[in-house]
Structure formats: structure tokens, C-alpha cells
Amino acid sequence: MEDKVVLLDFWPSPYGMRVRIALAEKGIEYEAREENMWDKSPLLLEMNPVHKKIPVLIHNGKPVCESLNIVQYIDEVWSHKSPLLPSDPYQKSQALFWADYVDKKVFNFARQLWRAKGEGALNKEFIECLKIIEGELGDKLYFGGQRFGFVDLALVPLTSWFYSFEVCANFSIESECPKIVRWAKRCREENQSVAKSVPDHQKIYGYVLFLKEKYGI
Amino acid sequence: MEDKVVLLDFWPSPYGMRVRIALAEKGIEYEAREENMWDKSPLLLEMNPVHKKIPVLIHNGKPVCESLNIVQYIDEVWSHKSPLLPSDPYQKSQALFWADYVDKKVFNFARQLWRAKGEGALNKEFIECLKIIEGELGDKLYFGGQRFGFVDLALVPLTSWFYSFEVCANFSIESECPKIVRWAKRCREENQSVAKSVPDHQKIYGYVLFLKEKYGI
């Protein structure tokens, strides 16, 4: 049977970007269906009745939900090319730990930043989280060492939002976390999968302006 | 090399119980070190500097943190006995999805319940989450079908707290989610790993009374 892969997606979503990167890394052909977040399709509600959120990967009719779970699934099913998680159980546990940290901490604070009006406390918490993950990166090229992998994929989509965060919340990420900013540039320049899956920061900023107008912020 | 396994734990913690169950399922010998949550040991702070939380599994000197991540690690390293996650990638993705749901939703609401004073809204949210996971259980014996597995392990520790939730927050879980209550009983009665790792509900209630006194609630 030929694989039929459909991705329910929304272009500014860093969660959706993760799955796009994974599919591109593996060279998987798929049909992308753009969702309207303010009028979700019956297909999305049917495929993800619990969270009702994108991204959803529909593989031969069966849904997989939650971005990191989807990426792990893709990595296992299409294991012949571009492994994303290490095969060694300990290394793998560490990659899953840091990806989980990105989800629970970094993304969580980031979610509030575009609404921010320069609150010092929120900026500070976000930067503290980012510094911890920068400490884990250290002087390596990528989180896993020499090659782009699972933790890079988990975090890099958010960097397309950095410019918007800086403008909205009035702080400089580069001056606080220069290694993360250099790493983000490297991810984009050296990996086609990232370059083609993660929108330009100006395009994201345009979306943020749309959001601000929509919600009167 | 013989495996040296140490678990940093705290007896009433449902997160710690998950790891205890996994170690018991696999028949792994380990040294349990009980932590004091109000005066954390230097070892805990060294082994989990990011979250500073139990459980931490220290395997031959190397730490693994976050309960579901630890259980996944145990399942991969000691793969010869009692598999917890399915080997099929799709089934595995579904088990990981539901375990994540238990973490993000069920445990999250539960965490607030012992402090509750019968707030209807919190009880309602908790029961709604529990009903969703009860729907996933359906009429199966266990979440994965005939055998105790990953999702059972993720959820069953919390059932030792159900009696305390019912008393503190003044509602009946059994009348709302009878299948979950029957499943919890089955888990305990048919699995030695659960019976020996999950404390009795009266012991948990004693701990809750201690907490209430400590925090003046």
C-alpha cells in the first residue's frame, strides 16, 4: 500500500512547523491542509476530538496528535532516513527530556509574549528558560552534537517568532542568548528542511499585527 | 557491569509511584532513597538541576528525569520482560498520547483538588477529564486491551488519591466514573507491581491531613 499522508496545519504555528520539518527531513510527500483556527474543519474535530488542535498527521486514515508525539511517530515509521532521535536509550531519554522542557517551559512562556506590553517579569521568566536551554546547547553545533536532531526540531520553530517577541515585549533576545540566536541561524542556513518549513520573521510579525488588531491589544 | 539503579522518590507522589510500578514490572532491583520535599538532598539538586523534582532514576550514575520519560527509558533498557509500550508505532503513538493527556489534564486538575473546598468548577473540570479517559478505556480490561501497560501505569497512581479528593472536594468519583473505579481495583488486584507500589488510600489521606495542617488549609 502506498502511504497516504495528510497534515492538518496552520502556517504560523510552531507546533505545525515541527511536523513540517520532520516530514521534510524524511522526504515524505504529503497533502497539507490549512486550517482556519476560528472556524475549525469537521475533519480536524473528528481527527482530534480531545484537544481540537493542529497539527494532526493522518497516516492512511489514522490520526496522530500532539506535535512531539507526531514527530516521534514519523521518526519510527520512516526510520530509514535522517534519524531524529538517538537510538541509544540514554541519549534518547535526554533528547526527550529537553524537548519536553521546550514544550512545558519555553513555549509556555512564549505563548504569552506577543500579548505582552513589556512586563518585566514575563520577559525575565522567558529569558531564564531560554538561558537554561542555551546552557544545554553549550558550544555544540546542534543539541545532539554535529547533526540536526529532535531537540533542534522542537525549538527552532519558535525562533521565527523571536522578532515579534522582541518588538512586542521590548527586549533583546540576541543580547541575552547569543548562542541560541547563532544556533537558530545555523539551523536555517544548513538545513533545507528548516528553511522551507519555518516562515520568515517578518511574515510572523504580520500575523502578530493581525492578531493584535483582531483582539484589540 | 552489573546495573546500579537508584530511585530518588517521595512515597505519596503519583509520579514516583509510576517509576516504582515500572521497576516492579521489570523485576529490577534498586535502592530507593526517600527525599524530604521541604529539604531536598544535594544529590537530588545535582541529578535534576532543571526541575529539582522527584522521581529521578540514577542508572549507573547517570540521571533520567520526568516520570513518563523514566518509564519509557526503563521499558527500552529492560526490554526483555513485561513490555509496557506497544512495539507497533501507531499503537505506541496512541499510548503516548493518552499518557500525555493524563499528565497535562488529569494530573493537572488533580493537583489542586486536595486544597479544594468543594469548588464546583474544579470538580467539574476534573470529572470531565476523567470521563474522557474513561471513554478511551471503554469496556476494555486495560487501556491497551488485555494486559496492564503504559497508560494504566500513568494513571493508576492517582487513584490512591481519589478517596482524599472525594473527602476534600466533596464529590463522588465512583458515581461519575464507575468504569475507572472498577479498572483501578482491577489494576491493584491483578498486578503485584501496582499493589506493592501504590499506597493505600487511607495512608494518602493521612498525608493530606498533614499537608492541610502544615499549610493551614
Image (cartoon, coloured by chain):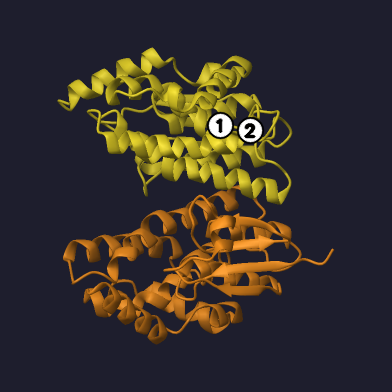
Chain colours: A yellow, B orange
Q: Where does label 1 land, which residue?
A: A153
Residue most extreme to the left: A216
Report the side of B163 relative to B84 (left or right): left
Judging depth in this view, the residue of A136 and A90 nearest the camera is A136
Residue most extreme to the right: B1
Q: Position of residue B59 (x, y in %)?
A: 70, 61
Please state which amino acid type lies under the numbered disc 1.
Leu
Q: Position of residue A16 (x, y in %)?
A: 45, 30
Q: Is there a contact, CB below 8 Å, between mark 2 and mark 1? A: yes
- Quadrant of the drawing holding the N terminus of chain A: top right
Q: CA distance from mark 2 to mark 1?
A: 6 Å
The residue lying at 29 percent from left, 38 percent from top is A121
Q: Which chain's residue wears label 2?
A: A
Please state which amino acid type lies under the numbered disc 2.
Gly
Sort mark 1 into few (<14), some (14-19) or many (20+) by Cα contacts within 10 Å: many
Judging depth in this view, the residue of B49 and A195 nearest the camera is B49
Q: Which chain's residue wears label 1?
A: A
Judging depth in this view, the residue of A8 and B112 nearest the camera is B112
- Quadrant of the drawing holding the C terminus of chain A: top left
Residue A61 visible within the image: no
Q: Is residue B25 above or below residue A137?
A: below
Report the side of B91 relative to B26 (left or right): left
Residue A75 visible within the image: yes
Q: Is residue B13 above or below residue A174?
A: below
Q: Where does label 2 land, which residue?
A: A149
> Judging from the image, what secondary structure is the residue with disc 1 in?
helix
> Judging from the image, what secondary structure is the residue with disc 2 in?
loop
Q: Position of residue B7 (x, y in %)?
A: 61, 68
